[in-house]
Amino acid sequence: MPSRQFMIAASCTFIFCAILCALVLITRKGDPVAFAVTGTLFTNRTAEVPDPNLTVGYDGQFAYYIARDGAASLPLLDGPSFRLQRILYPLAGRLLAFGQPALVPWSLLLINLVAQSIGAGLMAVLLSTFPRTPAILGGITYGLWVGLIFALRLSLTEILCFTLAIGAILSYQKMHFRTTVILLMLSTITKELGLVIAAGLALHAFAQKRRGWSVLIFGAPFILLMVWWGILRLMFGDVPTQYPAARFEFIPLRGIFVGRIDTVELIMLGLWIVIPTLILFTLAIITLWRKRILSVSTSLVLAASAFIFVMPGVSWEDPLAAYRVATPIIIAGLIFLAEHFPKQLKWFCILWISALALAAFLPALWV
């Protein structure tokens, strides 16, 4: 039963992630702000007593500042238009905390912990629609994908973004197109990567001659993002495209070679992202050629692969960012393999779960 698969995958993910969160809280003396990894480089701007030992922190601090301070967070943001484009996660954190600053880091952590567990459960339900598929294993693989584990540890937006996106895929499969559009709109204003999943679903709808829904599935999230960008432009005089993370490469996979990436990191990125992407893209093209039918999963792989090929160099440079940003290929790959190559799915699951070994190379995140 799908409900059983949902519960097992969600529970296993929740237990694993809760243990990691408890470890962080224990080693950080129970301080939930540790998940945001704040840096004095930005807090000094408003501090009564500046810290002379500057630290940079990490991206999750900006979601935390927005959730905690609302409009008053602007002096703490490195790029207001860039950070505020991803508004849903900090807004949800602020609402869940009832505007109480002390509760905000807890609410952001709770949202990500619950959303990651739900995402794993939804993935298991999605995979269960295909025969002979280890749906629970696939759901747990998504739940334990190291990029999302990093997002949980660092209070980042990807978890909520992709949980909403998986919900949109499930709704699309059930032909609940209005729900699909709404979920994709919410996913996109959580993080613009929701557009990758929207593009895959829109491509399939177009191939199925559902032209109107195809336009809505991609157009509605895109227009919402553009309208929000327009508001941010009026407020701050710029849009997020000026930042390095929005500068895509035109030569496939060029981004991985233009950044400062050492040999070990390059091998790991190749093993867990580049090689699986190339395999899945090739299999998708072969499947499309042989069957002459564009399935939902094939469309998602084509969209996700295209995104990986043009990923900005700055995303590849950051060992934490690349795995988070590459999550669409994990989502698409699991669904595609379940539909077309169910016997091979377990090998990809083993490969992607093994990426958790990366955590061993970053002990400072946990202890």
Image (cartoon, rainbow, N blue to C red):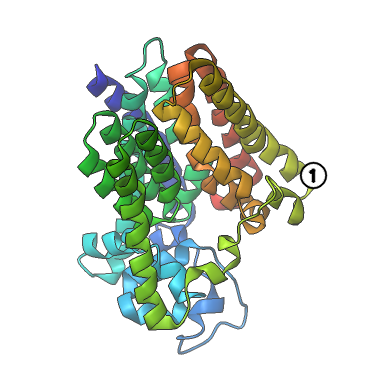
Residue indicated by mark 1: 263
**Residue farthest to the right, as pictured:** 263
- Residue 67, located in which quarter of the rendered image? bottom left
User: x%, y% of residue 37?
Assistant: 50, 63
- Relative to 215, 58 lies left or right: right
Residue 153 to residue 14: above or below:
below
Amino acid at dot 1: Thr
Taking the spot 37% from the left edge, 57% from the top edge, the residue there is: 222
Taking the spot 45% from the left edge, 83% from the top edge, the residue there is: 237
Residue 214 to residue 191: above or below:
above
**Tally of numbered discs:** 1
User: x%, y% of residue 232?
Assistant: 38, 75
Taking the spot 72% from the left edge, 49% from the top edge, the residue there is: 254
- Relative to 231, 23 lies left or right: right
User: x%, y% of residue 91?
Assistant: 29, 64
Q: Nearer the viewer, residue 117 or 189?
A: 189
Q: Is residue 47 visible?
A: yes
